[in-house]
Image: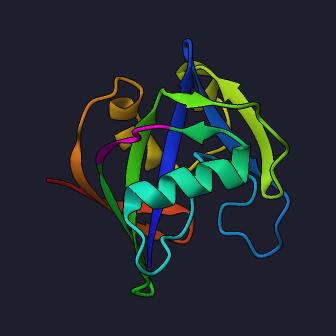
Amino acid sequence: MKFTVGYIKRDDEFLFLYRNKKKNDINKGKYIGVGGHIEPGETPEECMVREAYEETGLKIENPNRLGTVLYEQDDGYTEEMYVFYIDKYTGELHESDEGELEYMTPEEFYKKPHWIGDELFLKYVFENRKFGKFKLKYKKDELVEVEHE
């Protein structure tokens, strides 16, 4: 499965989504970026624009793709995620049906519950730097293997 995630910058803060509203959510109780699954015929950039609007009410422009993350679970399930940096947008935040939206600094984010593997690529995102590709293998919630190309 392929999906997108974007990190929307405002001054020295980034927008995160605290996932707490959906049942059976692998991200429940964690802070993540906004985004979602790529629909058939959709480019990652088109998906990012659509998902950002659906989840936040913000109309983003020219999302900057920084890299790709391949997630692998110990049962063999894999997902490919395209990561974006976003600093051009219009509109006002609205409530999300997937969780609570919150702007925070990188330092504040690191103190919140999140996937530990996200720290590997977020250090690039916070500086708007390309990072190529990460492969992150998890056993349940535990990061057990990392590759970076």
Tell me: 7 left or right of 122: right
On whether residue 63 falls in the magenta region, the answer is yes
- Rendering coords of residue 110 (x, y %): 57, 30
Q: Is residue 28 above or below residue 57?
A: below
Colour basis: rainbow
- Rendering coords of residue 49 (x, y %): 52, 51
What residue sits 61% from the left and 40% below the top? 59
In terms of depth relative to the viewer, which is nearer, 88 or 10? 88
Residue 51 visible within the image: yes
Q: Quadrant of residue 73?
A: bottom left
Q: Quadrant of residue 125?
A: top left
In terms of depth relative to the viewer, which is nearer, 93 or 143? 93
Tell me: 52 left or right of 91: left
Q: Is residue 149 above or below residue 131?
A: below
What residue sits 35% from the left and 23% below the top? 127
Query: Which quadrant of the figure contains the N terminus?
Result: bottom left
In terms of depth relative to the viewer, which is nearer, 142 or 105? 105
Tell me: 23 left or right of 131: right
Residue bounds of the magenta highlight: 61-66
Residue 30 visible within the image: no
- Rendering coords of residue 93 (x, y %): 77, 34
What residue sits 82% from the left and 40% below the top? 94
Q: Quadrant of residue 36?
A: bottom right
